[in-house]
Amino acid sequence: MAIDGVKIIDSDDGHDIYNAIVERYKDGISVDTIISDILSEEENFCTDEFYTEIYWTAVAYSLWKIGHLSTDIKQKALDIIAQGPNEFWLEIDDKALKQRQKVLDKLAVQLQSENPKPIKVRKSKTKRVPYFKVGDVLAVKFENEYGAIFVSDVDQSPRKIEYHLACTRLLQEEKPTMEQFLNSKIACRKDNTNFGIDTDCWFNHKDLGLLLDNLEIIGTVELYPCKLWTLAPRRTLEDIYEEITDEPRIGKLRLIDTYELVKEVVQE
């Protein structure tokens, strides 16, 4: 675990805990679920006294930030703080122990009072509906040609909708059929039944909305589980075209038949 400093969130574990609490809270996850989930991970985080200190102080601080610090968690953190910083901080820096003590003293004061400005969840005025769902196969209309892509993942929360579009190597003059899509090639790593897609365009909801006139659903498939090895933010139709026609990378990528990723054709 990387430790960048003595602050409460200056470690990999601290960041993971903060995100599991604060960022999920911003996404509208209920506080009861958040607390239940993070407490269920106690054994995984608290492998020794040093990591126990990091875990409970980060949990208490994060809950204090959102204004939902319970009495039992507050007391647990205060008991840990009362023991003083773990001696392992000296292994990081000879001044770290004293610096950490100051951080813990400040945290103890914070925890014993309500956060005057807790993080608030912004209420969305309108609930956005995704344009596409996982498994949708899309024909992409370029200026003089068509391509074929499919939706490999949709990441949705109250604050965002993001789409992962996997690009096949198909490029032709007429709109592709599902048969042509299934018989196309795609850059993908294959290990038995495990797949890692090497070609991916990552769009946010707003940017993809500008391209809807050029995208048409031609079918839907159920995919085998697959990982996304290339997560490339994209914004334009040209970005998709470049991913399909990325000639310099073809020699370095393994191409497989697209149908190998398909468990079942749901609709065509």
Image (tube, rainbow, N blue to C red):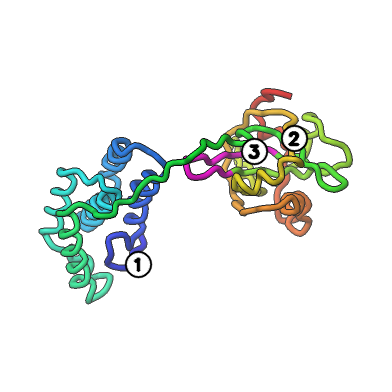
- Which numbered marker is on residue 216? 2
Instruction: Please give the count of numbered marks on the rendered protein.
Output: 3
Q: Amino acid at mark 2?
A: Glu
Please report whichever mark, 3 or 2, sits nearer to the chain's N-terminal start: 3
Mark 1 surroundings within 10 Å by alpha-carbon count, few (fewer than 14), some (14 through 19), many (20 or more): few
Mark nearer the viewer, 2 or 1: 2
Mark 3 and mark 2: span between their CA atoms? 12 Å
- Check disc 1 and report the residue beneath it: 4
Quadrant of the drawing holding the N terminus: bottom left
Q: Are marks 1 and 3 in contact (CB under 8 Å)?
A: no
Quadrant of the drawing holding the C terminus: top right
Mark 3 surroundings within 10 Å by alpha-carbon count, few (fewer than 14), some (14 through 19), many (20 or more): many
Image quadrant in which you'd find residue 113: bottom left
Mark 2 and mark 1: span between their CA atoms? 47 Å
Task: Report the span colored magenta.
Answer: 150-162
- Check disc 3 and report the residue beneath it: 151
